Image (spheres, helix red, strand yellow):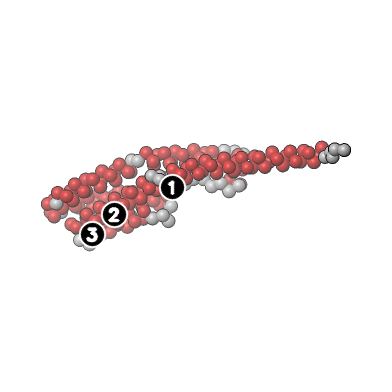
Amino acid sequence: MKFKLPIGVCVLISLALVLFGLLFGTMTGFTEDRRQVTALLEGENGLLDVLSYRGADGLNLCVVARRHLNNDLDVAALEKASNQLRSESESLVSKKQVDTQLNNKVETVAQKLTQTQSFKESNRDGKYLDMLTTDLQNLSSSAMITTYNTAAKDFNTQLNAPVIGDLAKMLGVKPCELYQ
């Protein structure tokens, strides 16, 4: 003899399975999408690496500048900005502000260097300054910045979609921080 479940219990089981599938699918889908955006941020040669390279170039410029400018406040500010840009504890918003400061200080320090007699006499440091400023410019126009921001905006747009996005937010999925 077969055991029969009442129709109400079958409907409840079906609803529970549909709800589980909806929750599980939403959570895994949004988690995977966020993981891809996070890979653009934290992965090898990702946005954080680009910013770290810019910080390293700023520190290298400090080394050159200290050969020709003693106890200069702009060099100290450049070093501080470079270290903050390389810091892992800074948020993307603060890194964007620090990156702007770094650009300003690089220009200021480069201008001061070109006015220094000892720098004018050093062919090696002149070439090094040109190389560092070119590298800093190339890194600031890196495609990774645009790629990350586009992916993060797309993810945030999906997360703001009605019903599925609201469900994902209730399940704890957070929006991605933009580099702006």
Question: How far is the residue under mark 1 from the one under mark 3?
Answer: 34 Å
Task: Return the residue at label 1.
Answer: 42
Residue depicted at x 36% and y 46%: 50
- x then y, percent, for residue 73: 25, 59
Q: Position of residue 114 (x, y in %)?
A: 17, 50
Q: Residue at x 35, y 41 (%)?
A: 142
- Give the class, few, some or many, for how many residues have Cα within 10 Å of label 1's Cα (few <14, many ≥20): some
Label 1 residue SS: helix
The quarter of the rendered structure image containing the N terminus is top right
Mark with earlier residue (1, 3):
1
Q: Is residue 174 above or below residue 4?
A: below
- Foreground residue among 64 and 112: 64
Q: Secondary structure at mark 3?
A: loop
Numbered badge on residue 24: none
Q: Dots 1 and 3: beta carbons under 8 Å?
A: no
Looking at marks 3 and 2 on the same chain, the residue that comes earlier in the sequence is marked by 2
Secondary structure under tag 2 reads helix
> Residue 59 — which label?
2
